[in-house]
Amino acid sequence: MRSRALVIFSTICLCVFLLAAITHLCAKSPYLMYQLMTHYAPPETTGLPAAEYAPVAKMITRYLQTGRNFQHTYVVDGMEYVAFNAKEQAHMADVHSLFFCSTWVCWVLLILSFGCLLQFDSNAPWKSLPHMLTFRHTLIAVLAVVTAVIILACIDFNSLFVLFHKVAFTNDLWLLNPQTDLLIRLMPIEFFISYAAIMGGMWLAGMVAMLVVSTIRIKKLKANEGE
């Protein structure tokens, strides 16, 4: 019973780590952010010159990693403009804190996952049919839960998006105004839907890969037992 619980716990940690790692990978990509911004928030809707999109995307992704200098200045017809106001900067400071905490959570989950595996000593889970079956069943259970969330997101992404912000943040700085705040014009709801779709697709690919590998391993273990 204890070994089964360890397999379940380590598998859940591994699944969450995979999602967190993919989220960080996407959030740190200035190219991806630039592509989504230019697609869903063209210059004619944001007021930001097209030439400034790449520098802004690079600045934001760098800020998520370092937490330093969330601001961008640019010149139009000899006049200098400051892109982001104090409220936007305060909100992004909260976002960076959340991003920083998730980085540590990511590594803790990975360590816990491997720590659980070390408890098996020489009888590694991948050498045991019951353990591999538990691993696969846990993967399927996690996929079922995530599928339910995906269905809800397809029905009403905006409500889930708002719920996430209410849970993740302790203030209302995330309630930005498109009339005054460039950040929300650069990142409309469609921007986040695409980000979620890309990250979700990558995560599902990783989960399917683990399911395929575990199924092949289970078949091999069953064949060995039949010899």
Image (cartoon, helix red, strand yellow):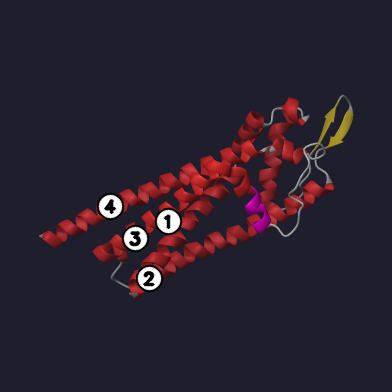
**Mark 1 / mark 2, whichever is N-terminal:** 2
Question: Mark 4 or mark 2, which has the lower sequence index?
Answer: 2
Which residue is at 47% across, 67% downward? Answer: 112
Q: Earlier in the sequence, mark 1 or mark 3?
A: 3
* Few, some or many residues within 10 Å of mark 2 (<14, 14–19, 20+): few
Tell me whether circle 1 and circle 3 mark residues in contact (CB < 8 Å). Answer: no
Q: Earlier in the sequence, mark 2 or mark 3?
A: 2
Q: Secondary structure at mark 3?
A: helix
Looking at the rendering, the stretch of residues picked out in magenta corresponds to 162-168
Q: Tell which of 223 and 174 is nearer to you.
A: 174
Separation (CA) of disc 1 from disc 3: 11 Å
Q: Circle 3 sits on which residue?
A: 135
| Residue type highlighted by circle 2 | Ala
Query: Residue 142 got which mark?
Result: 1
Report, in whole angstroms, how far the alpha carbon at label 4 lies from the one at label 1: 16 Å
Q: Would residue 73 appear left or right of 108 to someone viewing this image?
A: right
Is residue 200 placed above or below 6 in the rendered structure? above
Question: In the rendered image, which residue does mark 2 sit on?
Answer: 5
Q: Where does residue 214 sit, x and y in percent of width and height?
A: 30, 54
